[in-house]
Structures are given as C-alpha cells and as structure tokens.
Image (cartoon, rainbow, N blue to C red):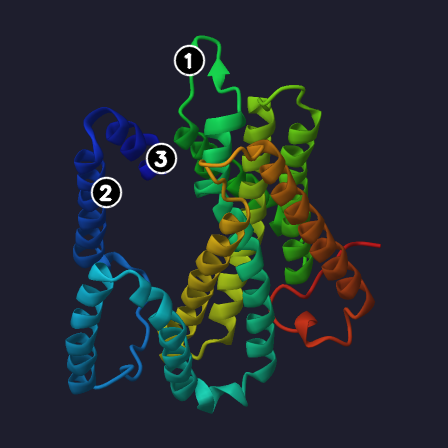
Amino acid sequence: MKRIVVVIPIRRIDGWHAGFGLAAIGMLAGNLSLTFGSNMLREKIDKGQPLCSHATAKGVIAIAVPLVVVALQYHFVVSMLFPLLVIAVCCLIYRELQGTFAANREKFQKLFVLLALMVIFYGCEEQLGSTLILFSERHVDRDFFSWNIPASSLIMFNPLTILLVGPLLSRLLERRALHDLIKVGISFALLSVAFGLLYGGCLATTGEMVSLYLVIGSIVLIAIGEILIGPTVYAAGSAAAPDSLQGVTMGIVTLGFALANLFSGFLSQLMAIDESGGVNSISVYSNGFMWITYGACGMAIVLLMVTFKFKKQSFLWKGNGSQVLIDS
C-alpha cells in the first residue's frame, strides 16, 4: 500500500533515488519493529530444530555472495541458475519434512494442489504490475475530471480493495463457511470476469482508448480474488506443517510465489509489444486478455464441478474448512 500511494508519486516527482530510499526506510522500520516488538507476541512456540548447522549456513552464505555478484553482472546467469536453485530448495525442504509426509500425507497433497492453483492465479494477477500498466499507458483514457491519473497509480485500487473489502468478506465467511476449493474456484471466476472486462473493452472501443472504469473494475475483482485464494493457501500450509517445522513448510508457499512470478513473466512476454514494428498493440493485448479470460473461466468451472462431484471422496475435502459447504 505504501509503495503505491507514497513511493510511486515520490519517485515521479523526486526521482528513483527518493523512491528506493523510502522503500529502504520502510523495510528498516519493519525489521526494527519485529526486533523490538517480538516480546509483545502473545504465544510462545517451540523453535524446533534448526534447518541446518551454523557451519552449513556459513558455507551457503560464502557460496551465495559470489553468485549474487556474478548474477548482477551477467543477467543470463540468473535464468540458468534459477531451475537449479528451485530443485536444490525442493530437495532441502523434502529432506527436512520427509519424516512428516507419511503422517500428514493428505494435508500435504491438499497443500500441493492449492499451490499449483496459486501459481496459475498469481501468474495472471501479477500482470497488474507489468502488462496492465503498459496497457493503461497506451490505451486507457485516464482523465478523471481535470486530473490525469498516472498509469502506475491505478494499482492502488488493489490494496485499497483488500483493506476495505477484506474485513467484510472475512465476517461473511465466518457466517457462511465455504470449502477451500470453492473459494479458489470463485477466485478464478473473478479473475475471468476481470480480464473479460478488459477483453470486452478492447473489442468495444471504436478507437484506441478503453474506459478507465473497466480497468478499475478489473483491478477490484482481482483483489477480491486475492482475498479468497491467498489466505486459503497459507492456512493449508499452516495446517500441514508440524509445530517444529512451521517455517520450512511455509517456505514451500514462498517458493510457490516465486514460481508464480516466473509464470507471470512468461505471460507478459506473450503480450509484449514490438515498438519498432507497425503492430496494432490493442489487438495484441486483446488476444492475451481473451486467453486469460477463457483459461480462468475453464479453471473455475473445473474446480467447482470437481468439488461438488467428489466432495466426500476426495482428500481435498478433509481438513480445515470442510465442515460446511453450502446449505442445500
């Protein structure tokens, strides 16, 4: 929220150094708050066994620092090393959790299915920070009365929606509980409608400009989908993790977000515009929005159909959140 409401406008006025400086100050403030406010935490939990010995940690740092330096100088190294790093992290996590897989097999199965769905959802959602900004810069009428809204500032409707709608949706779900797969299915349905608005706007425009309200509406719908799917995946990770390895298990969720960012870059490339050629850019965006719309709609339909058909037989129906489906 601070990044969008404060950092981006400051960056536009005072330059990149001011924007990055504010971001660094915010991160430092967060670390200081966590360090000095840790005694205020209500619950004390067992720290469990360390992930690795101090010698191993020092060795990893000694190897990681030169790799980071090389990666900064040669960007292609990152793309080459990333798959190997993912495999290494997966092996490390599996080694630490292999003793708990048998006891919590169904919970981990559920977690991995939800993670796969999360990668797809957030891969599309991350277009807000890349493709949608470029689309808004080129093809959205951003005049609001006498104010021209910067394209990058449109993303502020995402955290604003989460802040305003999140508490209301949480209370609603407390009264009428839905199972995890239904919430994820609704998230994909909202994602489909959101990109459907953008696709429809591209088709309906007589010129090159799309209505600002369609873009804002799509951002709001995606934010509501985030409210449903994000906490669901984190809750599944917390439920599957043993008390002494909570951090390691939640690292799997973080790895899922990393894969979502990688998938997001792939989608962005499909809608990249060649500035040197005479390509009709709005048709390229329209094509990309269409495929995301159809894909998300298909995922929503499959998830809801599978959920209702196999609600009692599937392992996905066991565990937290499965007490109530929908009153018939």
Disc 1 marks a residue whose amino acid type is Trp
Q: Earlier in the sequence, mark 2 or mark 3?
A: 3
Q: Residues within 10 Å of mark 3 (few under 14, many from 20)?
A: some
Disc 3 marks a residue whose amino acid type is Ile
> Does the CB distance between marks 2 and 3 fall below 8 Å?
no
The residue that label 2 is drawn on is 23
Q: Earlier in the sequence, mark 1 or mark 2?
A: 2
* Vertical placement of residue 188 versus 308, above or below: above
Q: Position of residue 282 (x, y in %)?
A: 59, 32
The residue that label 1 is drawn on is 147
Residue at 49% x, 54% y is 264
Residue 1 can be seen in this image: yes
Disc 2 marks a residue whose amino acid type is Ala
**Closest to the observer: 29 or 305?**
305
Q: Position of residue 326 (x, y in %)?
A: 76, 55
- Of helix, strand and loop, which one carries label 2? helix
Q: Quadrant of residue 156?
A: top left
- Of helix, strand and loop, which one carries label 1? strand
Q: Is residue 157 left or right of residue 283?
A: left
**Closest to the observer: 135 or 158?**
135
Q: Quadrant of residue 215?
A: top right
The residue that label 3 is drawn on is 4
Q: Quadrant of residue 279?
A: top right
